[in-house]
């Protein structure tokens, strides 16, 4: 990550230096809605189920971001279960175990996550 220096166009911008995080965004954002399991009764029957990838800003994660070690964040999420971090793959597996989504939908989403 680079540092972005601003021109002193006003007194508030003098000596202003911010971290440029534009290189962290790769492609379009992850859409965390998955097709739900079709039910036979009740209202609606179908819908979408939210699955989440959770990253907690710990000292180790902040250091990885600061030093531009973006590739290591995935392993930090996998080992950070105590802090409440959850990978997208584990969230999809939990929704499958709770019988909220179909197996083929889960397999497609997990394969898509592995390609990224």
Image (cartoon, grey):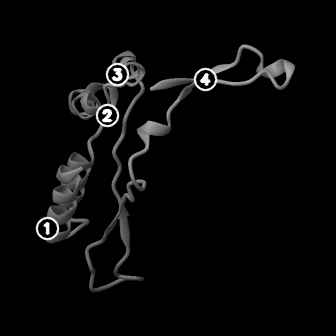
CB contact under 8 Å: marks 2 and 1: no
CB contact under 8 Å: marks 1 and 3: no
User: If you read the primary sequence from the N terminus, does the residue marked by circle 4 or circle 3 appear first?
Assistant: 4
Residue 33 on image: x %, y %: 37, 63
* C-alpha gap between disc 2 and disc 4: 27 Å
Label 2: state its secondary structure. Answer: loop
User: If you read the primary sequence from the N terminus, does the residue marked by circle 1 or circle 3 appear first?
Assistant: 3
| Mark 3 nearby-residue class (10 Å; few <14, some 14–19, many ≥20) | some
| Mark 2 nearby-residue class (10 Å; few <14, some 14–19, many ≥20) | some
* C-alpha gap between disc 4 and disc 3: 17 Å
- In this rendering, the answer to whether 110 lies above or below 69 is below
Given the current orientation, which residue lies at the most extreme bottom position? 40
Q: Which residue is mark 4?
A: 18
Which picture quadrant has residue 50?
bottom left
Label 1: state its secondary structure. Answer: helix
Mark nearest the camera among 2 and 3 is: 3
Q: Is residue 111 shown left or right of residue 13?
A: left
| Mark 4 nearby-residue class (10 Å; few <14, some 14–19, many ≥20) | few
Which picture quadrant has residue 62?
top left
Q: Which residue is mark 2?
A: 85
Q: Which residue is mark 3?
A: 64
**Residue drawn at x 77%, y 16% as measured from the top left:** 14
CB contact under 8 Å: marks 4 and 3: no
**Residue drawn at x 21%, y 49% as measured from the top left:** 89
User: If you read the primary sequence from the N terminus, does the residue marked by circle 2 or circle 1 appear first?
Assistant: 2
Mark nearest the camera among 2 and 4 is: 4
Mark nearest the camera among 1 and 3 is: 3
């Amino acid at each position: 990550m680079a540092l972005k220096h601003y021109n002193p166009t006003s007194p508030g911008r003098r000596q202003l230096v911010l971290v440029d995080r534009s290189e962290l965004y790769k492609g379009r954002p992850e859409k965390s809605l998955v097709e739900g399991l079709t039910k036979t009764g009740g209202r609606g029957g179908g819908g979408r189920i939210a699955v989440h990838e959770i990253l907690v800003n710990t000292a180790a994660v902040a250091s990885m971001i600061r030093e531009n070690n973006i590739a290591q964040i995935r392993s930090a999420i996998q080992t950070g279960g105590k802090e409440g971090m959850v990978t997208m793959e584990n969230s999809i597996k939990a929704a499958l175990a709770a019988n909220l989504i179909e197996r083929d939908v889960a397999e497609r989403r997990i394969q898509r996550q592995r390609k990224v």
